[in-house]
Image: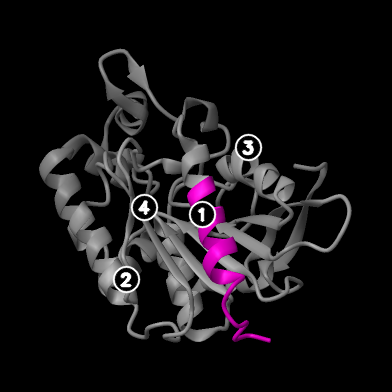
Amino acid sequence: MGPASQHQGFVQGKAGRLSITTCAPSQGQPRADLLFIHGAWSSSWYWEEHFLPWFAAQGYRARAVTLRGHGVSEGRVRWASVAGYVDDVARATADLTNPVLIGHSMGGFIAQQFAAHRKVRGLALIASVPPFGAWQSLYRIARDMPLALLRCFATLDLYPVVADPAKARSLLYSLGPGQTEKDHLLAQLKSESFRAFLDMLFLPVRHRPPPELPVLVMGAGQDRIIPAAAIAGTARFHGVSPVILPEASHMVPVDEGWLTAATALEDWIAGTVLASPDQTA
């Protein structure tokens, strides 16, 4: 593992400036270009903390985009659509050479929409919304985690539905008695897009990526958001066998075992993507 350089900056998107972070080997030609796409109600922070420097040390140019209206990226997230996020990805990949897309949760849905209409070198889906929509996930959340469903709607700039804003925020971040999550992101989080949420429900991926495109579907054994049936369905859709990480949760990229996920991803890139003919050349 060698030294790596990191650069943070902005590119101009249709809705405003997009935050971009890139890590690359300090010397030599990168083995491949990777673009990481974050999930809902978040930003690229978890890619930046773990995955980007690790993959750069393995010889890759690794980039993460923060989608419009998330983190410090500009744009009116409330009325953004998946099509808008796909455009964000296009802006973020403009100077990359035949990138491999890695999408987590909602980011995986966006990556699938992108790959269905644009050429990419590989597509990795980590604990991702299935291509046929988010109904399974929504049903599971409503059945098993009703407070999480309230949190979903609370983050749509609908805090007024709860009389006490403090109560709304406690619903958003509480895991249970005495437990909280994402508190360190409070200053960065912005509301998720209601339009994009509807897109994931009603606008499934209607076009498969090219059959020769290498695809990795990775699920988490302890995922309380994306059920195993959705992971299996996604794998069938793309004609591959899923990789399941038994000890991981939906937030695979920040689990204590994140390195297991990163290693499995790198094994797939090195052993399958780079070993396959580059269809985008």
**Going from the N terminus, do you reach mark 2 or mark 3 first?**
3
Q: Residue at x 59, y 47 (%)?
A: 44
Q: Tag 1 or tag 4, which sits nearer the N-term?
A: 4
First of labels 4, 3 by sequence position: 3
Residue shown at the point (47%, 84%) measured from the top left: 212
User: Which-is-in-front pick, marks 4 and 1?
Assistant: 1
Can you say whether 213 is above or below 6 in the image?
Answer: below
Residue 248: x %, y % from top left: 35, 38
Q: How far apart are marks 4 and 2 (CA)?
A: 12 Å
Q: Marks 3 and 1: CB-CB under 8 Å? A: no
Q: Residue at left 69%, top 65%?
A: 33
Image check: 53 left or right of 37?
right
Q: Which residue is drawn at 40% across and 27% down?
A: 181
Say which residue label 2 marks.
131
Indicate whether residue 63 is drawn in magenta: no
Residue at the far left in the pictured view: 143
User: Which residue appears farthest toward the top when viewing the image?
Assistant: 178
Tell me how many marks there are.
Answer: 4
- 169 vs 235: above or below: above
Could you say whether the residue bearing mark 2 is in a helix, strand or loop?
A: loop
Residue at which label 3 appears: 49
Helix, strand or loop for disc 1 = helix
Answer few, some or many: residues within 10 Å of disc 1's Cα (few below 14, many 20 plus, some between 14 and 19).
many
On residue 265, the disc is 1
Magenta residues (range): 263-281
Q: In the image, 109: left or right of 95?
A: left
Indicate left or right for 150 with 156 as reference.
left
Kind of residue indicated by mark 1: Leu
Give the position of the N terminus as an image quadrant: top right
Amino acid under disc 2: Pro
Element at label 4? loop
The answer to whether residue 80 is visible is no
